[in-house]
Amino acid sequence: MRLGTMSVNERGHLCIGGMSTVELAETYGTPLYVFDEDLIRQNCRRYVNAQDCPGMVAYAAKAFITVAMARLVFQEGLGLDVVSGGELYTAIRAGFPPENIIFNGNNKTPEEISMALRSNVGRIVVDSLDELDMLTTLARKMRVRPRILLRLNPGVSAHAHEYVLTGIDDCKFGISVKGGAALSAVMAALAAEEVQLVGYHVHIGSQLLDLDAPLLAARVLLQFALQASESTGYWPTELDLGGGLGIKYLLSDRPPDIEQYVRALTGCVREFCTAHGKPLPYLLFEPGRSIVGEAGTTLYTVGATKLMPGDRHLAAVDGGMTDNPRPALYDAKYHCVLANRVNDEPVSTYRIVGKCCESGDVLIKEASLPELRKGDILAVLSTGAYNYSMASNYNRVARPAAVLVSSGRADLIVAREDFSDLVRLDLLPARLVG
């Protein structure tokens, strides 16, 4: 499975962006996150070019965000969807235009909302009536009038792990369209002079591999908008249809392509509005994984190998759940290749495990690979989304570096932590000295 600018050089080494991954490992060490800049830009442009009506594509920062990544998506004409003060701070440090920032999240603190108001972000997505009350109070105090969208829960289930479903009834996100809660929120937002209600937001989950669920969610949202307009006279000028488009983690994965996804949802909204004589809202999309996921590869160095009972082979690498917790959290599946001997034929099935003191620190349960030797470089593909974002210092393991590669050039965009970083915020009470 080759993605983006991946190729194999004359020495049988996996290359990304014209750079040998073996040389990258030698230069920057492992574990190492490698990001294919050309593929990221290509995915951004595909989203922008697929839109055939007024709207904005806002990259979902939670998938992977650094100052460099924020600058890259800005250069490609995208907005930015942030869900915390830290992500907003990163965007501001990157010089991202605040009017193109959407501030999302289900439990924003007063400090985060104040930060968003001071920064003049373009849109705040309100997740509850409590948040609406807090926002109006802060907006009145700061003498600003933010533009808001109400996040609505359509009660739609997608075919994904329960931990990444965000649109089902029993979910912490959004205001339910059932039982009158959403209509009450609309009426409250319209009555609040401190905010300007511009539309509705919906997001049903992540790693979506078909269009059925997102199309159903869009229809539920539109039907609610129509019913709300009959009660209040308000029709949204904006609709945010969220993100969640899946990527290819395994050879068997068959996600819709970006163009299919955008055009299907855009067509659904256009058809509904035409049928009911309503103006087409400004459409927003919030892709994250489908922009950066396949553009990321993690390099590891193979350490100990073992032959286990039942003739099972096991290989340990110098990373694991600290740089990729998704297999432990979601039973996420990945494909890997032997980066320094790509052309060698597979001879055994290996279980790839990490170095953490957890039996659940398993990156790949079954990987068909050539015979692994100590010092080999293993490349795990499609690790661009949520790996760096969710990395931890469990076992006081330092987090990896990240490089951006393109046209034979590699640039460090995240420095590798060292042991001094691990104790930088530690404090020693005086009573423990001596």
Image: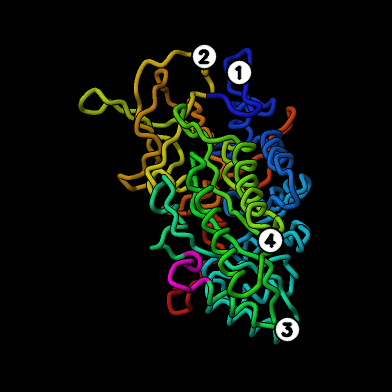
Sequence-wise first label, 2 or 3: 3
Q: What residue do we see at 63% from left, 57% from top? A: 276
Q: Which residues are magenta?
A: 173-182
Q: Viewer-nearest of labels 3 and 1?
A: 3
Q: Viewer-nearest of labels 2 and 3?
A: 3
Instruction: Please say if 265 is above or below 142.
Output: above
Q: Decide: marks 2, 1 in contact (CB < 8 A)?
A: yes
The three-letter code of the residue at mark 1 reads: Val
Mark 2 → mark 1, Cα distance in angstroms: 8 Å
x then y, percent, for residue 96: 76, 57
Q: Viewer-nearest of labels 3 and 4?
A: 4
The residue indicated by pointer 4 is 238
- What secondary structure is marked by label 2? loop
The residue indicated by pointer 3 is 142
x then y, percent, for residue 122: 73, 65
Mark 2 → mark 3, Cα distance in angstroms: 62 Å
The residue indicated by pointer 1 is 8
Q: Which mark is residue 343?
A: 2
Q: Decide: marks 4, 2 in contact (CB < 8 A)?
A: no
Sequence-wise first label, 3 or 1: 1
Residue 165 inside the magenta-drawn segment:
no
Mark 1 → mark 4, Cα distance in angstroms: 46 Å
Sequence-wise first label, 2 or 1: 1
Q: Is residue 122 left or right of residue 112?
A: right
